[in-house]
Image: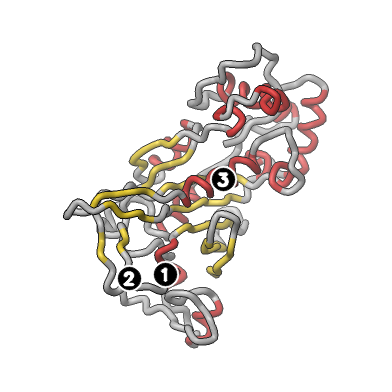
Amino acid sequence: MVRTRVPTPHGEIFLHLYHNNRDNKEHLAIVVDPAQLLEDRTVTVTHAPFIRSRSLNAVWPRETPVDRITRGAYVGRLSSQSQNPSDPDTVVELPGAKEVGGAPSPLVRIHSECFTGETIGSMRCDCGEQLDEALRQIFQSRALRTGDGREVIVPGRGAVVYMRQEGRGIGLLAKLRAYNLQDLGHDTVSANLMLGHGADERRYEVAAAIMRDLGLSGGESDPQRDSGIRLLTNNPDKVASLEDAGVRVTERVPMVPRTWRCQDEDNYSFSKKYLRTKVLRMGHMLSLPPFGGVESMDSSYSD
């Protein structure tokens, strides 16, 4: 429905808002593709064309060039001097850019909305940390060698598909009720079941559709554009669900919590039950840290 540029602490992103006919929710795609904003067209890049929305770039009925620019169907960086609506019949590239082979597939993270973790900094989960860490990793540059032996630094690229699936799909109201049950000693699975919900009610068909729209699915319909993705996750269900929906996952990249990576036992203690629940109860593919004893498994899980 709309795309706009947003500066973040990690760098500039394109925020896309999607409507869909499945769940009547507005989902988001946070696209990291710095080359789209480069004003120097003589740079060396590793990818062409850009990560762009097919549906946004299409011509909508009775729209004017100003309408296209207002909803984000433009090329380059908007300014009072630069106002270039996109042409859906033209592949958007960097004119004059030199392409380098060997770049990895875009790094993609599916992130489910978490008001408590992202907005108020709840320590019942690490969702806010995961969102920030995903963007940090997607923005990471890489050094590659060109055919003539030169080393070039290329920007990171990819996307966070932000799904409005609060509380693993049960909604904020039920999630907060589950917190009270957890304080009584129930783990997250038992709390959800007691409330009449499944342990995890999230679905990924809409996320897969967003990836297809952005040219990230690795589908056969557009092999020149679709290269597949590296998926940033520890959750085997996400990998399987996306592959079932036709998304080609070329690699699973682990999401290692910062407190585990730094082996910070003091910071780890607040969420060790939560993180152990992910690994031991939900089958997430992540080694437990070397510190901390075995605890009863409660609190929530995500990823």
Residue 37: percent from left, percent from top: 45, 69
**What is the quadrant of residue 169 in the picture?**
top right
**Residue 220, visible in the rendered structure:** yes
Q: What element carries label 3?
A: strand
- Residue 277 is situated, as x and y percent measured from the top left of the image, at 62, 23
Give the side of residue 133 with respect to residue 272, left or right. Answer: left
Seen as rendered, the residue at the extreme front is 150
Residue at 32%, 71% (x, y): give it.
94
N-term-proximal mark, 1 vs 2:
1
Q: Do the residues labelled 1 and 2 touch (CB within 8 Å)?
A: yes
Reading the image, the residue beneath label 3 is 111
What element does badge 2 sit on?
Answer: loop
Which quarter shows the N terminus? Answer: bottom right
Q: Distance between the residues labelled 1 and 2?
A: 9 Å
Mark 2 lies on residue? 94
The location of residue 42, given as percent across then percent down, is 31, 71
Q: Number of numbered discs present?
A: 3
Q: Name the residue under label 1.
A: 38
- Of callouts 3 and 1, which one flags the residue occurring earlier in the amino acid sequence? 1
Q: Distance between the residues labelled 2 and 3?
A: 30 Å
In the rendered view, does 90 fall on the left or right side of 199? Answer: left
Disc 2 or 3, which lies upstream in sequence? 2
Residue 53 quadrant:
bottom left
**Can you say whether 278 is above or below 9 in the image?**
above
- In the rendered view, would you say 303 is above or below 53? above
Q: Which amino acid is tagged 3?
A: His
**For discs 3 and 1, the disc positioned in front in the rendered view:** 1
In front: label 2 or label 3: 2
Q: What is the C-alpha distance between the residues marked 3 and 1?
A: 27 Å
Q: Is residue 192 above or below residue 99?
A: above
Q: Which of 79 and 148 is in front in this view?
A: 148
